[in-house]
Amino acid sequence: MIISSLLDTDLYKFTMMQVVLHQFPGAQVEYRFKCRNAGASGVQPLAPYVAQIREEISALCSLKFQDAELNYLRSMRFIKSDFVDFLGLFRLNEKYIQVSALPSGEIDITIRGPWLHTILFEIPVLAIVNEVYFRNTHQLPDFMEGRRRLDDKIAQLQVPDLQALKIADYGTRRRFSLAWHEEVLRTLNARLGSGPHGQFAGSSNVLFAMKLGLTPLGTMAHEYLQACQALGPRLRDSQVFAFESWAREYRGDLGIALSDVYGMDAFLRDFDMYFCKLFDGARHDSGDPFSWGERLIEHYRSNRVDPRTKTLIFSDALTVPRTIELYRRFSGRCQLAFGIGTNLTNDLGCEPLQIVIKMVQCNGQPVAKLSDTPAKNMCEDEKYLAYLRQVFEIESGA
């Protein structure tokens, strides 16, 4: 059984789920799976493993939250007691998820149902697909190589002028395996330190944060802003509606805004002086990170906000060398945070799967992400994509 706890997921799933419970309890959604590097050299088809994936998902749906897990969630200042009470009754329902093999050799995973009852599928299902795939295709993993690479990353960080650089683990969804994920986190915690003077800021994974005494990290994901395309009063105001709904829920807590659901231009048009002052910062997840950082710092200045009081979070396909490069560019000009995913939890010398599960519909209406990296866009309705570009003044190449 790959997933043995419903806490084995990213924190932002719970923070978004709480907003869904309180503000959008009737929303109906659909998610679809995609392997971005299917057919690439070194990547084998997933279809042969459908039965194993289904078996693991069935086991996932048998889980419920344990008292110790609920108490841990209850201890977080931004988690409300009625939400924890709801989780005490919660189980994932297998009827909302279908997994099938496609003639191409790939797989289709569709999740369809109430947002409140499907939001927790994404991360553990992706972790299941990864672990099933790698235990079948790499039966003798080169853990020595993985440890060597991890040692090299740690050594790159442990130099005198980088003592203030902190990294975090964002690698649950694309990890090689549960056991390797835990080994990586234990090593980072022991070697970099997780206290105020350490370089390991924490993990997005709630289970390991609880188990290892780490800081759990996360706020919102793309699906939240995508859903607001259908839930808000009108499409053009959906990004503003999403940020205002978030602020209404958390009252200044969890104040990191995601900037790339409509691209940086559209984000900056909506992220006005009010939001610049209200939110603690923003997270980068597509496009050129250096350009993004420069533009955001200038945007703060033009809105009479000192960028040194705001946090810029970088989380797009980071490696340690790229992290160091970003740190040296922006250190002292703003507060910085770095979330490293696949490069931490799936770097053993084999080709990682670039898999995602994205929301494609909410309340029967198409929803989409139009990021600054076109390959990350995901929508099944080209007419809706064209309409979205028009409404948010996004160039057709985006």
Image (cartoon, helix red, strand yellow):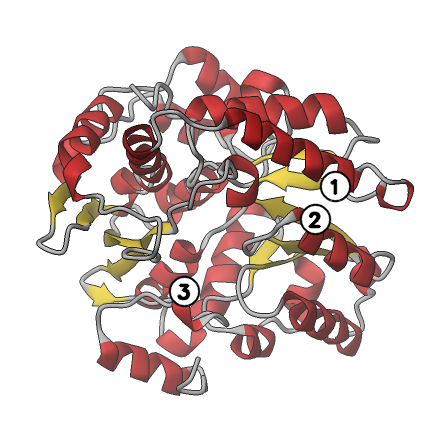
Quickly name the residue at label 1.
166
Q: Residue 33 carries which label?
A: none
- Amino acid identity at mark 2: Ala
Residue 89 shows up from this direction: yes
Residue 7 shows up from this direction: no
Compute the Cα span from label 3 to label 1.
26 Å
Compute the Cα span from label 3 to label 2.
22 Å
Whole-percent x, y for residue 176 in the image: 43, 33
Whole-percent x, y for residue 266 in the image: 52, 77
Whole-percent x, y for residue 31 in the image: 25, 52
Residue at 45 percent of width and 84 percent of height: 394
Quickly name the residue at label 3.
376
Quickly name the residue at label 2.
337
In the rendered view, would you say 285 is above or below 205? below
Mark positioned earlier in the residue sequence (3 or 2): 2
Residue at 31 percent of width and 33 percent of height: 128
Residue at 26 percent of width and 25 percent of height: 60
Dot 2 and dot 1 residues touching (CB under 8 Å)? yes
> Along the line of sight, which residue is nearer the eye, 322 or 205?
322
In the rendered view, would you say 114 is above or below 150? below
Residue 298 falls in which quadrant of the image? bottom right
Mark positioned earlier in the residue sequence (2 or 1): 1
Question: Dot 1: what SS?
Answer: loop
- Amino acid identity at mark 1: Lys
